[in-house]
Amino acid sequence: KIVILRLGHRPQRDKRITTHVGLTARAFGAEGMLLASEDKKLADNIADVSTRWGGDFYVKNDVSWKSEINKWKEDGGKVCHLSMYGINLPDAVPEIRQCDKLMIVVGAEKVPFEIYEMADWNVAVGNQPHSEVAAVAVTLDRIADTDPLRNEFKGGELTIVPEKCGKQVIDNR
Ligand code: SAM
């Protein structure tokens, strides 16, 4: 069970990137995303993708990050904060893999220092600056027991049939 906690989302500026964090989290096997800002439209857009393409991915809009982290830890969950300043991911993977209830925290603008203190792991996906989308994708791929690219998304309106060239989509409606 993996959820993403998205911090610092500014509805105008981060619309595309937060959408991509959510879609990437969904595609790579997270069960949902908690959004620590008010942006119902964005949450609805991601829910629409799930209706179209399957699976049960959810977005919880406008959460308080502090109470979500505290609740998660009270329920026995662990928290992995992704930051370029952290322990490099390959060194943390063996420990993180042992956890069956994981919250992955990603920021946008500067992340409050309290997050670093509350996290069980502060993990860098390589100690170079890049993107929360890339960080989420690589982390979910590296910590997975089975290949996330083989995930099946049940109940969608549309299913892609992989093609060498061209686009084939089955309409299940
Ligand atoms: N300047 C901000 C700061 O110092 O906190 C971070 C900006 S960065 C574009 C946004 C988010 O991407 C970060 O909060 C972090 O979650 C993620 N990120 C960027 N590079 C990363 C890296 N090398 N490893 C892990 N996460 C990274």
Image: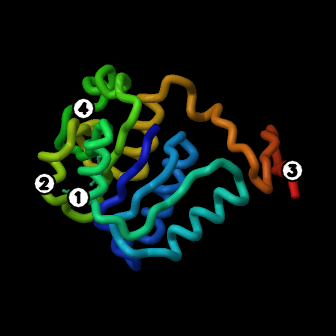
Q: Report helix, strand or loop for mark 4.
A: strand
For the point 22% across and 36% down, which residue is it? 121
Q: Report helix, strand or loop for mark 1.
A: helix
Direction from residue 123 to residue 103 in the image, left or right: right
Q: Which mark is residue 114?
A: 2
The x and y percentages for residue 20 are 49, 58
Q: Report helix, strand or loop for mark 3.
A: strand
Mark 1 and mark 3 in contact? Answer it, CB < 8 Å.
Answer: no
Instruction: Tell me which label, 4 or 1, sits earlier in the chain.
Output: 1
Camera-near label (3 vs 4) is 3
Q: Which mark is residue 88?
A: 4
Please say if 50 is above or below 73: below
Q: Which mark is residue 143?
A: none
Direction from residue 91 to residue 85 in the image, left or right: left
Q: Residues within 10 Å of mark 3 (few under 14, many from 20)?
A: few
Please say if 167 is above or below 18: above
- Look at mark 3 in the image and give the residue it sits on: 170
Camera-near label (4 vs 1) is 1
Mark 3 and mark 4 in contact? Answer it, CB < 8 Å.
Answer: no
Which amino acid lies under the numbered mark 4 shown in the image of this protein? Asn
Which amino acid lies under the numbered mark 2 shown in the image of this protein? Glu
